[in-house]
Amino acid sequence: MRAKKAKVTRAIPVGARIVCADNTGAKILKVIGVKGYRPTRRRIPAAGVGDVVICSVVSGKPDLKHKVVQAVIIRQRKEYRRPDGTRIKFSDNAAILFNLDKEEPLGSEIKGPVAREVLERFPEVGSCASKVV
């Protein structure tokens, strides 16, 4: 896991429900924590594109339901600015399930586009991404 090059707005707070965009069997994830978040008093932890979050599987296959998993945010609705001045935003908030110990995604394919900031931090995601924006 490398550092991010863009200043991504953290727009997905703890408690948000996001779409799981891979083929692991999970459909909707609920964010219950953000890895590496440095807290400030009375501020709700939030995550942005390329951040690792701890999630609970809300809906999906019965064997995955109610399990606590780690995921990487690949899309967010709130626009953010890249260093070259362009602004990027997607139509939904989405994440993929990720194994941090082996540093590889759990699914073999990703539905929809993936932000370039995710590939800079986790290059292994590029092997199963269909489109990179």
Image (spheres, grey):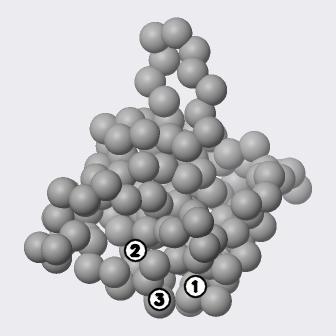
Q: Work out how far the residue at label 3 is from the one at label 1, CA to CA, in angstroms.
A: 6 Å
Q: In this view, does 117 lie to the left or right of 101?
A: right
Q: In this view, does 69 lie above or below 107?
A: above
Q: Is residue 80 left or right of residue 39?
A: right
Name which of mark 1 and mark 2 comes first in the sequence: 2
Q: Which residue is drawn at 31% across and 55% down?
A: 68
Q: Which residue is drawn at 64% across and 89% down?
A: 127
In percent of width and height, residue 121 lies at 73, 63
Q: Mark 2 points at which residue?
A: 21
Q: Front-most of 102 and 36?
A: 102
Name which of mark 3 and mark 2 comes first in the sequence: 2
Residue positioned most to the front? 101
Q: Name the residue under label 1.
A: 129
Task: Give the residue type that dot 3 points to.
Answer: Glu
Q: Is residue 112 left or right of residue 37?
A: left
Residue positioned most to the right? 84
Dot 2 falls on a residue whose secondary structure is loop
In percent of width and height, residue 7 lies at 75, 43
Q: Mark 3 points at which residue?
A: 109
Q: Dividing the picture into quarters, in which one does residue 129 lie?
A: bottom right
Task: Give the residue type that dot 2 points to.
Answer: Ala
Task: Give the residue type that dot 1 points to.
Answer: Ala
- The answer to whether residue 112 is seen in the rendering is no
Name which of mark 3 and mark 1 comes first in the sequence: 3
Q: Front-most of 49 and 64?
A: 64
Q: Which quarter of the image is occupied by the N terminus?
A: bottom right
Residue positioned most to the left? 62
Q: In this view, does 101 lie above or below 32?
A: below
Dot 1 falls on a residue whose secondary structure is strand
In percent of width and height, residue 58 lies at 19, 57
Q: Is residue 9 above or below residue 58?
A: above
Mark 1 nearby-residue class (10 Å; few <14, some 14–19, many ≥20):
some
